Image (cartoon, grey):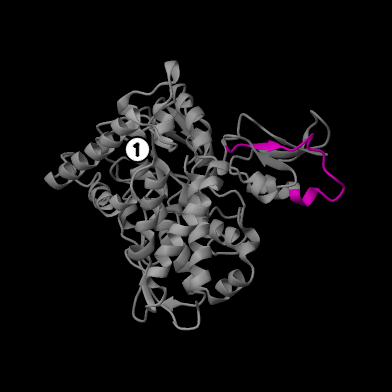
């Protein structure tokens, strides 16, 4: 599983990299970006779900496989 | 268009208790029309829909009644022009920019707290909340801190009287304050054009070619910041301190573990919104949650009720750190997400950190009953007097 940010929804609240700094970082404009390829470590789901919940735009999700269906919306 | 709904937002029982006030509003339905014809979207679903459709819910037309002489950049701008401004401004208000200012901003709030820490009492709104956001603005825009008090006076005169007079004619006092403020801002714009500094204003003025802003747009950015970025932070400082004053258990937790400061601020922001309702104008007929809004309708997006949506937060009306960071909408959403959100959050954290470093224990002054001014566009406490022991705390 991996985390993804929907760029159509993200407007730069910046909550993902605050609550899940291991999975996201901030860019020059303060928008979140997925660190690396976003793949979750075996114990990484809880951190990912914090970011999913914290996003006011519902722009963060956990997907099963690259390009796969969202497991958490 | 007058209707017979009988609903007046101003009737909400808001002053002492926002839970009662917003509960009254939410009970009217997902989409409700006020007696004056204005619509309110109260559910999270309705608010999100509006946030995601700026092509339907115009912000550009929503602030005409303010009668601003300059365009309110970037708030009162619709797509596609909006992007031109945010592309430039977002990096100027990004967390890494705020990080670079943090030491200076921390020192300023430390000094403000030191001024009353030995006296055993303070009035949070007047002694801290009013002063600090304006100092931050002056720092960010490269203007002298010595101008703080007259700057505050101009802005408060304008803000407190904004939209009050149904005739739309500003009073002589407001006109005088507006002229003084714009003269002041223009003076600094001219000075920085001639001798740029490393401040935000100089960076905007340095934009060239297709990116260059007109003089009115630059003034509009300054003016919007003073309308949207000062009394909102003043209000939030008051609300955070109010909740901490009422919750000694929470305060003790937070003093013991500063990592809880952020979640505490998020929960208070969710419940106590300085800007609880954001205006839009509907450009085309649109159905929201089963209700048809006609083109031209004035609409308020009620972020305050959306944040208390039943089923979203387990304890929807209480500060509960276990549900902090649940994605509240207090900084708005969509393309007009509060430009200053990162700065505002940092100001709040620095206030809480530095206040509690010097004054870990305090209470509301005996006899005081903190309340918000109501009706009011921005919600803020009128006063928050605190008392605390002095002596061995420093």
Which chain letter matches label 1?
A: B
Q: Tell me what residue is drawn at x 40 percent, y 77 percent.
A: B118
Q: Quadrant of residue B32?
A: top left
The spot of residue B61 in percent (x, y) is: 34, 30
- Which span of residues is magenta-colored? A30-47
| Relative depth, front residue between B298 and A8 | A8
Relative side of B29 to B69, left or right: right
Q: Tell me what residue is drawn at x 51 percent, y 70 percent.
A: B356
The spot of residue B188 in percent (x, y) is: 30, 36
Q: Is residue A38 magenta?
A: yes
| Relative depth, front residue between A65 and B249 | B249
Q: Is residue B390 magenta?
A: no
The spot of residue B333 in percent (x, y) is: 52, 40
Q: Tell me what residue is drawn at x 63 percent, y 72 percent.
A: B256
Residue located farthest toward the top when viewing the structure as drawn? B209
Q: Is residue B63 above or below residue B16?
A: above
- Magenta-highlighted stretch: main secondary structure? loop
Q: Which structural element holds mark 1? A: helix
Relative side of B165 to B349, left or right: left
């Amino acid at each position: 599983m991996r985390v993804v940010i929907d760029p159509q929804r993200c407007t730069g609240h910046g909550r993902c990299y605050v609550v899940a700094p291991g999975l996201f970082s901030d860019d020059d404009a303060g928008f979140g970006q997925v660190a690396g390829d976003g793949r979750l470590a075996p114990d990484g789901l809880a951190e990912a779900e914090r970011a999913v919940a914290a996003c006011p735009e519902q722009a963060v999700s956990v997907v099963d496989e690259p390009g796969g269906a969202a497991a958490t919306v | 268009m007058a209707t017979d709904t009988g609903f007046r937002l101003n009737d909400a029982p808001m002053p002492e208790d926002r839970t009662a006030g917003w509960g009254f509003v939410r009970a009217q339905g997902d989409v409700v029309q006020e007696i004056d014809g204005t619509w309110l979207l109260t559910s999270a679903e309705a608010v999100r829909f509006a946030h995601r459709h700026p092509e339907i819910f115009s912000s550009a037309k929503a602030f005409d009644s303010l009668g601003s002489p300059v365009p309110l950049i970037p708030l009162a701008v619709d797509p596609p022009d909006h992007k031109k401004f945010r592309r430039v401004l977002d990096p100027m208000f990004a967390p890494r920019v705020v990080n670079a200012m943090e030491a200076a901003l921390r020192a300023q709030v430390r000094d403000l707290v030191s001024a009353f820490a030995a006296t055993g009492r303070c009035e949070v709104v007047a002694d801290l909340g009013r002063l600090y956001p304006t100092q931050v603005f002056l720092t960010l825009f490269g203007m002298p801190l010595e101008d703080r008090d007259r700057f505050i006076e101009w802005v408060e005169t304008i803000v407190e009287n904004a939209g009050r007079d149904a005739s739309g004619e500003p009073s002589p006092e407001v006109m005088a304050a507006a002229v003084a403020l714009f003269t002041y801002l223009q003076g600094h714009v001219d000075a920085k054009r001639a001798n740029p500094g490393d401040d935000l204003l100089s960076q905007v003025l340095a934009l060239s070619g297709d990116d260059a802003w007109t003089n009115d747009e630059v003034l509009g950015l300054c003016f919007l910041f003073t309308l949207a970025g000062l009394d909102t932070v003043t209000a939030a400082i008051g609300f955070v301190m109010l909740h901490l004053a009422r919750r000694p258990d929470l305060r003790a937790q937070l003093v013991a573990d500063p990592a809880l400061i952020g979640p505490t601020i998020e929960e208070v922001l969710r419940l106590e919104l300085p800007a609880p309702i954001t205006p839009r104008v509907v450009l085309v007929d649109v159905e929201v949650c089963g209700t048809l809004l006609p083109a031209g309708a004035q609409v308020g997006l009620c972020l305050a009720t959306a944040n208390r949506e039943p089923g979203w937060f387990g304890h929807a009306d209480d500060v509960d750190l276990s549900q902090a960071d649940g994605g509240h909408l207090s900084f708005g959403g969509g393309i007009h997400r509060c430009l200053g959100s990162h700065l505002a959050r940092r100001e709040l954290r620095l206030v809480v950190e530095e206040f509690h470093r010097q004054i870990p224990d305090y209470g509301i002054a005996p006899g005081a009953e903190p309340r918000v001014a109501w009706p009011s566009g921005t919600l803020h406490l009128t006063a928050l007097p605190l008392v605390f022991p002095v002596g061995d705390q420093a």
